[in-house]
């Protein structure tokens, strides 16, 4: 299949003469000046489980990308001055940065304490509430997506607002049986934008449909009804702690990483200075 694919590409790129050459040597599939691209290089790029059409497209993309890079490189070699072509300093700087990054990652991986307690998170939250001001509303909701012709549709939607354990058992049972999708986030905060994606609209449009704690979206063009009961909404201000725990943990770990790197830098400088390897004149 791949051989057929490569031949098809060659026909598109260079015509019958290139196909004959490819069949003859079964190696070179494209050429830019003195540079040659071999079948094995293209084949290694193409997954074995793709269709012939996708294989052709992927191969063509690879060949065009390969050719573009080389054409630009060759053009730069002829158009730039000797000084402009000299990238020794940039390559050396990049190498140093890359080696430093890799060493820092290993150093952090060997030493970072990833255990973050709730007390530590609460302390951080209380000291840095300015970091957790809401960009958009958050909500506690129950959501259901159900076909319009389901007999119990209206009852399921109505029961979304109940807090009685018996009603909750009933709506969950009915939803599991009849609903396309159902979830209960009535006791945890949810980003309004995340809920809006369930409705297929932006969160501003969604909130405009909020009426008596319900958001219902349906149209004549679709066969289902999407509904959410909003148990609680917070539109502005500082986000509650339980909504921010993942972000708080990331902040704490980021701070620990920074402290490790600062300590590493200071330790290396001191060690080099003590050994006489680092001297300021």
Image (cartoon, rainbow, N blue to C red):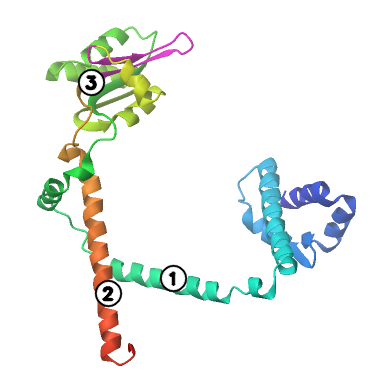
Tell me the SS state at disc 3: strand
Q: Quadrant of the C terminus?
A: bottom left
Range of magenta residues: 212-230
Say whether disc 1 or disc 2 marks the residue closer to the N-terminus: 1
Task: Say which of 218 and 193 sits in front.
Answer: 193
Q: CB under 8 Å between callouts 1 and 2?
A: no
Query: Mark 1 and mark 3: span between their CA atoms?
Result: 50 Å
Choose between 265 and 26: the one closer to the eye.
Answer: 265
Viewer-nearest of labels 1 and 3?
Answer: 1
- Which of these two is toward me, 223 or 236? 236
What is the x, y in percent for residue 252?
21, 55
Would you name the residue on which mark 2 appears? 264
Q: Position of residue 57 (x, y in %)?
A: 68, 45
First in sequence, mark 1 or 3: give its number: 1
Pointer 1: what residue? 97
Q: Tell me if residue 90 comes above or below residue 1 in the rendering.
A: below
Disc marking residue 230:
3
In the rendered image, residue 139, in percent from the top left (x then y), is placed at 23, 27
Farthest residue, direction front: 281
Crowd class of label 1 (few under 14; some 14 to 19; many from 20; radius 10 Å): few
Mark 3 surroundings within 10 Å by alpha-carbon count, few (fewer than 14), some (14 through 19), many (20 or more): many
Element carrying mark 2: helix
């Amino acid at each position: 299949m791949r051989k057929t694919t490569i031949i098809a590409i060659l026909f598109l790129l260079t015509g019958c003469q290139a196909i004959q050459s490819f069949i003859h040597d079964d190696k070179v599939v494209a050429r830019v000046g003195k540079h040659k691209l071999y079948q094995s290089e293209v084949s290694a790029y193409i997954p074995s489980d793709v269709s012939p059409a996708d294989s052709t497209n992927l191969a063509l993309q690879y060949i065009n990308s390969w050719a573009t890079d080389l054409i630009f490189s060759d053009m730069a070699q002829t158009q730039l001055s000797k000084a402009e072509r000299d990238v020794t300093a940039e390559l050396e700087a990049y190498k140093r940065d890359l080696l430093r990054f890799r060493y820092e990652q290993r150093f952090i991986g060997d030493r970072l304490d990833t255990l973050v307690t709730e007390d530590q998170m609460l302390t951080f939250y209380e000291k840095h509430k300015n970091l957790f001001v809401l960009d958009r509303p958050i909500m506690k909701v129950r959501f259901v997506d159900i076909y319009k012709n389901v007999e119990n549709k209206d009852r399921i939607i109505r029961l979304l607002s109940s807090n009685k354990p018996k009603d909750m058992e009933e709506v969950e049972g009915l939803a599991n049986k009849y609903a396309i999708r159902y979830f209960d986030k009535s006791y945890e905060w949810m980003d309004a934008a995340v809920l809006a994606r369930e409705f297929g609209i932006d969160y501003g449009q969604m909130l405009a449909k909020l009426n008596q704690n319900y958001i219902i979206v349906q149209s004549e063009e679709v066969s289902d009804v999407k509904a959410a009961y909003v148990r609680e909404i917070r539109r502005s201000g500082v986000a509650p702690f339980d909504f921010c725990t993942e972000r708080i943990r990331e902040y704490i770990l980021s701070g620990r990483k920074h402290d490790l790197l600062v300590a590493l830098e200071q330790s290396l400088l001191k060690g080099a200075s003590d050994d006489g390897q680092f001297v300021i004149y």
